[in-house]
Amino acid sequence: METGLLLKNCFAVWPGAGDDLLRNTDILIKGPGIVSVSGSGDGEGATATGLNADDPGQEAPVRIIDCSDHIVIPGLVNTHHHFYQTLTRNIPAVQDAELFDWLVHLYDIWKHLDEEAIYYSSMLAMGELLKTGCTLSTDHHYLYPEAVETDIMATQFKAARTLGIRFSPTRGSMSLGRKNGGLPPDSVVQTEEEILGDSERVIHEFHDPSDWAMNKVVLAPCSPFSVSRALMKDTADLARKHHVRLHTHLAETRDENDYCMKTYGTRPLDLMESCGFTGEDVSYAHGIHFDDAELERIKESGTHIAHCPTSNMRLGSGICRVVEMNRMGINVGLAVDGSASNDSSDMLGEVRNALLLQRVKYGAAAINARDVLTMATINGARMLNFNRIGRVEKGYAADLAVFNIRKMEYAGALSDPLAALVFSGYNHATTYTIVNGKLCVDNGNLVGASEDTITGMANALSEQMIRRHENHGSR
Protein backbone atom coordinates (compact mmCIF):
# COMPACT_ATOMS: atom_id res chain seq x y z
CA MET A 1 0.00 0.00 0.00
CA GLU A 2 1.41 3.38 -1.04
CA THR A 3 1.87 5.97 1.69
CA GLY A 4 0.47 9.44 1.20
CA LEU A 5 2.37 12.49 2.38
CA LEU A 6 1.20 15.51 4.31
CA LEU A 7 3.66 18.40 4.42
CA LYS A 8 2.27 20.02 7.55
CA ASN A 9 2.34 23.71 8.45
CA CYS A 10 4.94 24.70 5.85
CA PHE A 11 6.72 27.91 6.85
CA ALA A 12 6.37 29.09 3.25
CA VAL A 13 5.19 27.66 -0.07
CA TRP A 14 5.88 29.14 -3.48
CA PRO A 15 3.20 27.78 -5.83
CA GLY A 16 5.16 28.91 -8.88
CA ALA A 17 5.56 31.64 -11.47
CA GLY A 18 3.56 34.79 -10.77
CA ASP A 19 2.37 33.74 -7.31
CA ASP A 20 3.02 35.16 -3.85
CA LEU A 21 4.29 33.03 -1.00
CA LEU A 22 1.75 31.10 1.05
CA ARG A 23 2.35 30.85 4.80
CA ASN A 24 1.49 28.16 7.36
CA THR A 25 0.28 25.88 4.60
CA ASP A 26 -0.45 22.15 4.31
CA ILE A 27 0.29 20.20 1.15
CA LEU A 28 -1.45 16.85 0.80
CA ILE A 29 -0.08 14.28 -1.62
CA LYS A 30 -1.82 11.08 -2.65
CA GLY A 31 -0.24 8.79 -5.20
CA PRO A 32 1.71 10.80 -7.78
CA GLY A 33 -0.25 14.02 -7.42
CA ILE A 34 -1.02 16.99 -5.19
CA VAL A 35 -4.48 16.63 -3.66
CA SER A 36 -4.68 19.98 -1.87
CA VAL A 37 -2.71 23.06 -0.92
CA SER A 38 -4.40 24.80 1.99
CA GLY A 39 -3.94 26.87 5.12
CA SER A 40 -3.28 24.88 8.29
CA GLY A 41 -6.37 24.38 10.43
CA ASP A 42 -8.88 25.58 7.82
CA GLY A 43 -10.53 22.19 7.44
CA GLU A 44 -8.83 21.32 4.17
CA GLY A 45 -6.04 19.16 5.59
CA ALA A 46 -5.60 15.39 5.77
CA THR A 47 -8.88 14.62 7.50
CA ALA A 48 -10.99 16.73 5.15
CA THR A 49 -9.71 14.84 2.10
CA GLY A 50 -10.43 11.40 3.52
CA LEU A 51 -6.79 10.61 4.26
CA ASN A 52 -6.96 10.56 8.04
CA ALA A 53 -3.78 8.90 9.27
CA ASP A 54 -5.63 7.64 12.38
CA ASP A 55 -8.45 5.97 10.42
CA PRO A 56 -7.62 2.29 9.85
CA GLY A 57 -10.34 2.06 7.23
CA GLN A 58 -8.77 4.58 4.85
CA GLU A 59 -7.27 3.38 1.58
CA ALA A 60 -3.69 4.45 2.38
CA PRO A 61 -1.75 5.69 5.42
CA VAL A 62 -0.27 9.16 5.48
CA ARG A 63 3.20 10.16 6.60
CA ILE A 64 3.04 13.58 8.22
CA ILE A 65 6.17 15.72 7.85
CA ASP A 66 6.51 18.83 9.98
CA CYS A 67 7.57 21.58 7.59
CA SER A 68 7.28 24.51 9.99
CA ASP A 69 10.97 25.29 9.36
CA HIS A 70 10.84 24.67 5.63
CA ILE A 71 10.04 26.37 2.35
CA VAL A 72 8.49 24.26 -0.41
CA ILE A 73 8.91 25.09 -4.08
CA PRO A 74 8.18 23.22 -7.31
CA GLY A 75 10.88 20.71 -8.14
CA LEU A 76 13.64 22.22 -10.27
CA VAL A 77 14.03 21.16 -13.90
CA ASN A 78 17.44 20.62 -15.51
CA THR A 79 17.27 21.09 -19.28
CA HIS A 80 20.80 20.14 -20.37
CA HIS A 81 23.47 17.86 -18.91
CA HIS A 82 26.11 15.25 -19.77
CA PHE A 83 25.98 12.74 -16.93
CA TYR A 84 29.07 10.78 -18.00
CA GLN A 85 31.21 13.87 -17.45
CA THR A 86 30.88 13.56 -13.67
CA LEU A 87 33.82 11.13 -13.89
CA THR A 88 36.14 13.72 -15.46
CA ARG A 89 35.64 16.80 -13.33
CA ASN A 90 38.48 19.16 -12.63
CA ILE A 91 41.02 17.51 -14.98
CA PRO A 92 44.16 19.68 -14.61
CA ALA A 93 45.00 19.74 -18.33
CA VAL A 94 41.71 21.46 -19.20
CA GLN A 95 40.99 23.56 -16.14
CA ASP A 96 41.88 26.68 -18.13
CA ALA A 97 40.88 25.59 -21.66
CA GLU A 98 38.15 26.92 -23.93
CA LEU A 99 35.55 24.62 -25.49
CA PHE A 100 37.28 23.17 -28.57
CA ASP A 101 40.61 22.46 -26.82
CA TRP A 102 38.69 21.17 -23.81
CA LEU A 103 36.74 18.77 -26.00
CA VAL A 104 39.74 17.47 -27.95
CA HIS A 105 41.56 16.52 -24.75
CA LEU A 106 38.59 15.00 -22.94
CA TYR A 107 37.31 12.95 -25.87
CA ASP A 108 40.43 10.81 -25.54
CA ILE A 109 39.48 10.06 -21.93
CA TRP A 110 35.76 9.64 -22.58
CA LYS A 111 36.38 7.02 -25.27
CA HIS A 112 37.24 4.66 -22.39
CA LEU A 113 33.67 4.76 -21.01
CA ASP A 114 32.14 1.37 -20.29
CA GLU A 115 28.75 0.18 -19.03
CA GLU A 116 29.70 0.48 -15.36
CA ALA A 117 31.02 4.00 -15.88
CA ILE A 118 27.82 5.03 -17.67
CA TYR A 119 25.67 3.62 -14.86
CA TYR A 120 27.55 5.14 -11.93
CA SER A 121 28.15 8.49 -13.60
CA SER A 122 24.39 8.65 -14.17
CA MET A 123 23.75 7.71 -10.54
CA LEU A 124 26.17 10.38 -9.38
CA ALA A 125 24.70 13.14 -11.54
CA MET A 126 21.11 12.24 -10.68
CA GLY A 127 21.96 11.97 -6.99
CA GLU A 128 23.49 15.44 -6.92
CA LEU A 129 20.56 16.86 -8.83
CA LEU A 130 17.99 15.31 -6.50
CA LYS A 131 19.85 16.51 -3.43
CA THR A 132 19.85 20.09 -4.74
CA GLY A 133 16.14 20.21 -5.55
CA CYS A 134 15.94 18.87 -9.11
CA THR A 135 13.06 16.48 -9.81
CA LEU A 136 13.13 16.35 -13.63
CA SER A 137 16.26 16.18 -15.75
CA THR A 138 17.33 15.48 -19.25
CA ASP A 139 20.75 14.15 -20.27
CA HIS A 140 22.57 14.61 -23.56
CA HIS A 141 24.52 11.39 -24.06
CA TYR A 142 26.02 11.56 -27.54
CA LEU A 143 29.13 9.41 -26.99
CA TYR A 144 28.84 5.80 -28.20
CA PRO A 145 32.24 4.07 -27.83
CA GLU A 146 32.52 1.11 -30.17
CA ALA A 147 33.62 -1.18 -27.32
CA VAL A 148 30.39 -0.57 -25.38
CA GLU A 149 27.85 -3.18 -26.43
CA THR A 150 25.26 -2.48 -23.74
CA ASP A 151 22.05 -0.50 -24.31
CA ILE A 152 23.22 2.89 -23.03
CA MET A 153 19.77 4.44 -22.68
CA ALA A 154 18.46 1.35 -20.86
CA THR A 155 21.39 1.68 -18.46
CA GLN A 156 20.51 5.29 -17.75
CA PHE A 157 16.81 4.56 -17.31
CA LYS A 158 17.76 1.83 -14.82
CA ALA A 159 19.70 4.42 -12.79
CA ALA A 160 16.75 6.84 -12.96
CA ARG A 161 14.34 4.17 -11.69
CA THR A 162 16.70 3.30 -8.86
CA LEU A 163 16.85 6.88 -7.59
CA GLY A 164 13.30 7.84 -8.57
CA ILE A 165 14.01 10.94 -10.65
CA ARG A 166 11.74 11.92 -13.53
CA PHE A 167 13.92 11.49 -16.61
CA SER A 168 13.75 12.76 -20.19
CA PRO A 169 17.13 11.94 -21.74
CA THR A 170 18.19 12.56 -25.29
CA ARG A 171 19.34 9.93 -27.73
CA GLY A 172 22.39 11.95 -28.71
CA SER A 173 24.60 11.31 -31.70
CA MET A 174 27.88 12.12 -33.42
CA SER A 175 28.69 10.99 -36.96
CA LEU A 176 31.78 13.08 -37.80
CA GLY A 177 34.97 11.61 -36.35
CA ARG A 178 38.45 12.93 -36.88
CA LYS A 179 38.89 11.23 -40.23
CA ASN A 180 35.92 13.24 -41.50
CA GLY A 181 37.02 16.57 -40.03
CA GLY A 182 35.27 16.29 -36.66
CA LEU A 183 36.73 16.70 -33.17
CA PRO A 184 36.00 13.29 -31.56
CA PRO A 185 37.98 10.06 -32.08
CA ASP A 186 36.49 7.80 -34.73
CA SER A 187 35.91 5.12 -32.07
CA VAL A 188 33.07 7.08 -30.40
CA VAL A 189 31.01 8.08 -33.45
CA GLN A 190 28.43 6.03 -35.34
CA THR A 191 27.16 5.82 -38.89
CA GLU A 192 24.05 7.79 -39.70
CA GLU A 193 22.16 4.57 -40.36
CA GLU A 194 23.05 3.24 -36.90
CA ILE A 195 22.02 6.50 -35.27
CA LEU A 196 18.65 6.80 -36.98
CA GLY A 197 17.81 3.12 -36.47
CA ASP A 198 18.61 3.19 -32.78
CA SER A 199 16.84 6.52 -32.32
CA GLU A 200 13.63 4.96 -33.59
CA ARG A 201 14.15 1.92 -31.35
CA VAL A 202 14.54 3.92 -28.15
CA ILE A 203 11.45 5.99 -28.91
CA HIS A 204 9.38 2.82 -29.25
CA GLU A 205 10.94 1.23 -26.16
CA PHE A 206 11.10 4.09 -23.67
CA HIS A 207 9.04 7.14 -24.67
CA ASP A 208 5.86 7.91 -22.74
CA PRO A 209 4.00 10.89 -24.28
CA SER A 210 1.76 11.55 -21.26
CA ASP A 211 2.05 14.67 -19.09
CA TRP A 212 2.72 12.53 -15.99
CA ALA A 213 5.37 10.37 -17.65
CA MET A 214 8.44 9.29 -15.72
CA ASN A 215 10.25 8.66 -19.03
CA LYS A 216 10.35 10.67 -22.23
CA VAL A 217 12.87 10.54 -25.08
CA VAL A 218 14.36 13.47 -27.00
CA LEU A 219 16.50 13.20 -30.17
CA ALA A 220 19.68 15.24 -30.07
CA PRO A 221 22.48 15.40 -32.65
CA CYS A 222 25.41 16.75 -30.67
CA SER A 223 26.28 19.94 -32.54
CA PRO A 224 26.82 21.43 -36.01
CA PHE A 225 30.50 20.40 -35.85
CA SER A 226 29.92 16.75 -34.94
CA VAL A 227 27.14 15.64 -37.30
CA SER A 228 26.36 16.22 -40.97
CA ARG A 229 23.65 18.51 -42.28
CA ALA A 230 21.87 15.41 -43.60
CA LEU A 231 21.77 13.75 -40.17
CA MET A 232 20.48 16.93 -38.57
CA LYS A 233 17.62 17.07 -41.08
CA ASP A 234 16.85 13.34 -40.96
CA THR A 235 16.76 13.45 -37.16
CA ALA A 236 14.30 16.33 -37.23
CA ASP A 237 12.09 14.40 -39.64
CA LEU A 238 12.23 11.27 -37.46
CA ALA A 239 11.40 13.19 -34.28
CA ARG A 240 8.34 14.75 -35.88
CA LYS A 241 7.20 11.41 -37.24
CA HIS A 242 7.06 10.13 -33.65
CA HIS A 243 6.11 13.43 -31.93
CA VAL A 244 9.18 13.70 -29.73
CA ARG A 245 11.32 16.75 -28.94
CA LEU A 246 14.61 17.85 -30.51
CA HIS A 247 17.74 19.28 -28.93
CA THR A 248 21.29 20.28 -29.85
CA HIS A 249 24.13 22.58 -28.83
CA LEU A 250 24.02 25.86 -30.72
CA ALA A 251 25.76 29.23 -30.70
CA GLU A 252 27.87 28.29 -27.69
CA THR A 253 31.16 29.79 -28.87
CA ARG A 254 32.53 32.03 -31.58
CA ASP A 255 34.60 29.06 -32.79
CA GLU A 256 31.34 27.32 -33.66
CA ASN A 257 30.22 30.32 -35.70
CA ASP A 258 33.56 30.29 -37.53
CA TYR A 259 33.28 26.55 -38.18
CA CYS A 260 29.80 26.87 -39.68
CA MET A 261 30.83 29.79 -41.88
CA LYS A 262 33.87 27.88 -43.13
CA THR A 263 32.12 24.52 -43.60
CA TYR A 264 28.60 25.52 -44.65
CA GLY A 265 28.99 29.16 -45.64
CA THR A 266 26.36 30.16 -43.12
CA ARG A 267 25.84 30.91 -39.43
CA PRO A 268 24.62 28.17 -37.04
CA LEU A 269 20.99 29.31 -36.88
CA ASP A 270 20.78 29.51 -40.68
CA LEU A 271 22.04 25.94 -40.79
CA MET A 272 19.40 24.80 -38.31
CA GLU A 273 16.65 26.49 -40.28
CA SER A 274 17.79 24.78 -43.46
CA CYS A 275 17.45 21.43 -41.65
CA GLY A 276 14.02 22.13 -40.18
CA PHE A 277 15.64 22.17 -36.73
CA THR A 278 13.67 25.07 -35.27
CA GLY A 279 10.25 25.29 -33.66
CA GLU A 280 8.27 24.83 -30.49
CA ASP A 281 9.52 21.23 -30.27
CA VAL A 282 13.21 22.29 -30.42
CA SER A 283 15.61 23.51 -27.75
CA TYR A 284 19.19 24.76 -28.07
CA ALA A 285 21.74 24.44 -25.32
CA HIS A 286 23.64 27.70 -24.64
CA GLY A 287 22.45 30.10 -27.37
CA ILE A 288 25.03 32.74 -26.48
CA HIS A 289 26.13 34.16 -29.82
CA PHE A 290 22.87 35.09 -31.55
CA ASP A 291 22.51 38.53 -33.09
CA ASP A 292 19.37 40.68 -32.84
CA ALA A 293 17.78 39.39 -36.04
CA GLU A 294 18.42 35.79 -34.99
CA LEU A 295 16.72 36.33 -31.65
CA GLU A 296 13.65 37.59 -33.50
CA ARG A 297 13.64 34.43 -35.63
CA ILE A 298 13.97 32.26 -32.53
CA LYS A 299 11.04 34.08 -30.96
CA GLU A 300 8.88 33.67 -34.06
CA SER A 301 9.67 29.96 -34.33
CA GLY A 302 8.95 29.24 -30.66
CA THR A 303 12.34 27.58 -30.20
CA HIS A 304 13.53 27.22 -26.57
CA ILE A 305 16.92 28.00 -25.01
CA ALA A 306 18.58 25.90 -22.28
CA HIS A 307 20.74 28.43 -20.43
CA CYS A 308 23.94 27.07 -18.84
CA PRO A 309 25.49 29.96 -16.88
CA THR A 310 28.12 28.10 -14.84
CA SER A 311 29.52 26.24 -17.83
CA ASN A 312 29.54 29.43 -19.87
CA MET A 313 31.59 31.15 -17.17
CA ARG A 314 33.84 28.13 -16.56
CA LEU A 315 34.82 27.85 -20.26
CA GLY A 316 34.79 31.59 -20.90
CA SER A 317 32.22 31.11 -23.65
CA GLY A 318 30.27 34.33 -23.08
CA ILE A 319 27.04 35.58 -21.51
CA CYS A 320 23.71 34.47 -22.94
CA ARG A 321 21.26 37.31 -23.59
CA VAL A 322 18.68 35.89 -21.19
CA VAL A 323 17.21 39.19 -20.01
CA GLU A 324 16.49 40.20 -23.59
CA MET A 325 15.12 36.75 -24.42
CA ASN A 326 12.77 36.89 -21.43
CA ARG A 327 11.49 40.31 -22.47
CA MET A 328 10.87 39.02 -26.00
CA GLY A 329 8.91 36.01 -24.78
CA ILE A 330 11.49 33.37 -25.73
CA ASN A 331 11.16 30.44 -23.35
CA VAL A 332 14.44 30.05 -21.45
CA GLY A 333 15.07 27.10 -19.13
CA LEU A 334 18.02 26.47 -16.86
CA ALA A 335 20.70 23.79 -16.99
CA VAL A 336 23.81 22.75 -15.11
CA ASP A 337 25.44 21.37 -18.30
CA GLY A 338 28.09 18.67 -18.13
CA SER A 339 29.98 18.16 -14.92
CA ALA A 340 33.32 18.54 -16.68
CA SER A 341 32.47 22.12 -17.67
CA ASN A 342 30.63 22.97 -14.46
CA ASP A 343 32.32 20.53 -12.08
CA SER A 344 29.09 20.06 -10.14
CA SER A 345 25.45 19.13 -10.67
CA ASP A 346 24.20 21.71 -8.16
CA MET A 347 20.79 22.77 -9.46
CA LEU A 348 20.03 25.42 -6.86
CA GLY A 349 23.56 26.77 -7.28
CA GLU A 350 22.82 27.11 -10.99
CA VAL A 351 19.82 29.29 -10.18
CA ARG A 352 22.06 31.62 -8.16
CA ASN A 353 24.68 31.82 -10.91
CA ALA A 354 22.00 32.59 -13.50
CA LEU A 355 20.89 35.59 -11.45
CA LEU A 356 24.37 36.93 -10.82
CA LEU A 357 25.71 36.48 -14.34
CA GLN A 358 22.79 38.34 -15.94
CA ARG A 359 23.28 41.22 -13.51
CA VAL A 360 26.90 41.54 -14.62
CA LYS A 361 25.66 42.29 -18.13
CA TYR A 362 22.32 44.00 -17.56
CA GLY A 363 22.39 45.54 -14.10
CA ALA A 364 20.93 44.76 -10.68
CA ALA A 365 17.30 45.51 -11.55
CA ALA A 366 17.21 43.51 -14.78
CA ILE A 367 16.39 40.10 -13.28
CA ASN A 368 15.25 38.90 -9.86
CA ALA A 369 15.09 35.71 -7.82
CA ARG A 370 11.59 34.82 -8.97
CA ASP A 371 12.59 35.25 -12.61
CA VAL A 372 15.39 32.71 -12.37
CA LEU A 373 13.31 30.29 -10.30
CA THR A 374 10.63 30.50 -12.99
CA MET A 375 13.24 29.56 -15.56
CA ALA A 376 14.28 26.63 -13.38
CA THR A 377 10.72 25.30 -12.89
CA ILE A 378 7.79 25.89 -15.23
CA ASN A 379 9.94 27.09 -18.14
CA GLY A 380 12.02 23.93 -18.04
CA ALA A 381 8.95 21.72 -17.76
CA ARG A 382 7.44 23.43 -20.80
CA MET A 383 10.68 22.94 -22.74
CA LEU A 384 10.70 19.20 -22.02
CA ASN A 385 6.95 18.93 -22.73
CA PHE A 386 5.70 18.12 -19.23
CA ASN A 387 2.46 20.03 -18.78
CA ARG A 388 1.66 18.95 -15.21
CA ILE A 389 5.06 19.71 -13.74
CA GLY A 390 6.42 22.96 -12.32
CA ARG A 391 3.76 24.18 -9.89
CA VAL A 392 2.69 23.44 -6.32
CA GLU A 393 -0.99 23.20 -7.11
CA LYS A 394 -3.84 20.73 -6.87
CA GLY A 395 -3.89 18.51 -9.94
CA TYR A 396 -0.16 18.84 -10.61
CA ALA A 397 2.40 16.11 -10.13
CA ALA A 398 3.87 16.01 -6.64
CA ASP A 399 7.39 17.03 -7.67
CA LEU A 400 8.61 19.24 -4.83
CA ALA A 401 11.84 20.57 -3.33
CA VAL A 402 11.72 21.18 0.43
CA PHE A 403 14.48 23.29 2.01
CA ASN A 404 15.14 23.98 5.69
CA ILE A 405 15.07 27.77 5.84
CA ARG A 406 15.87 27.95 9.57
CA LYS A 407 19.53 27.01 9.15
CA MET A 408 22.36 29.36 10.07
CA GLU A 409 23.13 30.14 6.43
CA TYR A 410 19.69 31.73 5.98
CA ALA A 411 19.61 33.60 9.29
CA GLY A 412 18.79 37.28 8.72
CA ALA A 413 17.37 36.53 5.25
CA LEU A 414 13.81 35.52 6.13
CA SER A 415 12.18 38.81 5.15
CA ASP A 416 11.88 37.03 1.78
CA PRO A 417 12.31 33.27 2.29
CA LEU A 418 12.05 32.46 -1.43
CA ALA A 419 14.76 34.90 -2.47
CA ALA A 420 16.86 33.65 0.45
CA LEU A 421 17.31 30.36 -1.43
CA VAL A 422 18.94 32.29 -4.28
CA PHE A 423 20.79 35.11 -2.54
CA SER A 424 21.89 33.32 0.63
CA GLY A 425 23.19 29.93 1.73
CA TYR A 426 26.27 27.87 1.16
CA ASN A 427 24.73 24.37 1.22
CA HIS A 428 22.13 23.97 -1.48
CA ALA A 429 20.84 20.60 -0.27
CA THR A 430 17.17 19.87 0.31
CA THR A 431 15.81 18.19 3.40
CA TYR A 432 13.25 16.40 1.23
CA THR A 433 12.93 15.97 -2.52
CA ILE A 434 9.67 14.45 -3.70
CA VAL A 435 9.15 13.07 -7.21
CA ASN A 436 5.83 11.70 -8.42
CA GLY A 437 4.63 11.64 -4.83
CA LYS A 438 7.56 9.63 -3.49
CA LEU A 439 10.44 10.72 -1.30
CA CYS A 440 13.71 10.50 -3.22
CA VAL A 441 15.63 12.52 -0.61
CA ASP A 442 14.57 11.95 2.98
CA ASN A 443 16.15 13.96 5.81
CA GLY A 444 18.92 14.98 3.43
CA ASN A 445 19.82 11.47 2.24
CA LEU A 446 19.17 9.67 -1.03
CA VAL A 447 16.51 7.00 -0.58
CA GLY A 448 17.17 4.76 -3.58
CA ALA A 449 20.88 4.02 -3.22
CA SER A 450 23.86 4.30 -0.89
CA GLU A 451 25.66 7.60 -1.33
CA ASP A 452 28.89 5.97 -0.10
CA THR A 453 28.62 3.31 -2.81
CA ILE A 454 27.99 5.89 -5.54
CA THR A 455 30.92 8.00 -4.35
CA GLY A 456 33.31 5.08 -4.08
CA MET A 457 32.42 3.61 -7.46
CA ALA A 458 32.58 7.00 -9.20
CA ASN A 459 36.05 7.70 -7.82
CA ALA A 460 37.31 4.25 -8.78
CA LEU A 461 35.89 4.43 -12.30
CA SER A 462 37.23 7.94 -12.81
CA GLU A 463 40.71 6.83 -11.83
CA GLN A 464 40.40 3.80 -14.11
CA MET A 465 39.41 5.91 -17.15
CA ILE A 466 42.22 8.40 -16.59
CA ARG A 467 44.74 5.58 -16.19
CA ARG A 468 43.56 3.97 -19.45
CA HIS A 469 44.01 7.30 -21.20
CA GLU A 470 47.55 7.70 -19.83
CA ASN A 471 48.43 4.15 -20.88
CA HIS A 472 46.92 4.33 -24.37
CA GLY A 473 47.19 8.02 -25.28
CA SER A 474 45.10 9.13 -28.25
CA ARG A 475 45.44 5.91 -30.23
Image: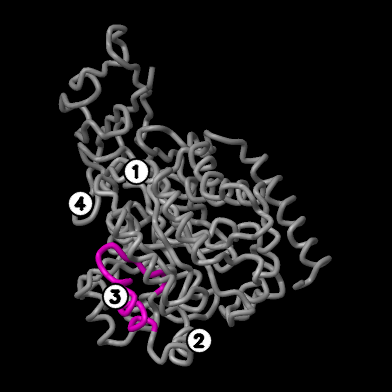
Q: From the image, which quarter does the N terminus lie in?
A: top left
* Secondary structure at numbered mark 2: helix
Disc number lying in front (1 or 4): 1
Circle on res. 208: 1
Residue that sits furthest to the right in the current view? 471
Q: CA distance from mark 4 to mark 2?
A: 43 Å
Residue 121 point in image, percent of width and height: 61, 51
Disc 1 vs disc 3: Cβ atoms closer than 8 Å? Answer: no
Q: Kindly indicate the quadrant of the structure image that contains residue 107.
A: bottom right
What residue would you read off at disc 3? 323
Mark 2 or mark 3: name the one nearer the start of the chain.
2
Residue 72 point in image, percent of width and height: 33, 43
Q: CA distance from mark 1 to mark 3?
A: 33 Å
Circle on res. 62: none
Q: Amino acid at mark 2?
A: Asp
Stretch in magenta:
268-286
Mark 4 or mark 3: name the one nearer the start of the chain.
4
Disc 1 vs disc 4: Cβ atoms closer than 8 Å? Answer: no
Mark 2 surroundings: few (<14), some (14-19) or many (≥20) residues within 10 A: some
Q: Amino acid at mark 1?
A: Asp
Q: From the image, which quarter does the C terminus lie in?
A: bottom right
Mark 1 surroundings: few (<14), some (14-19) or many (≥20) residues within 10 A: some
What residue would you read off at disc 4? 20
Vertical comparison of 186 with 113: above or below: below
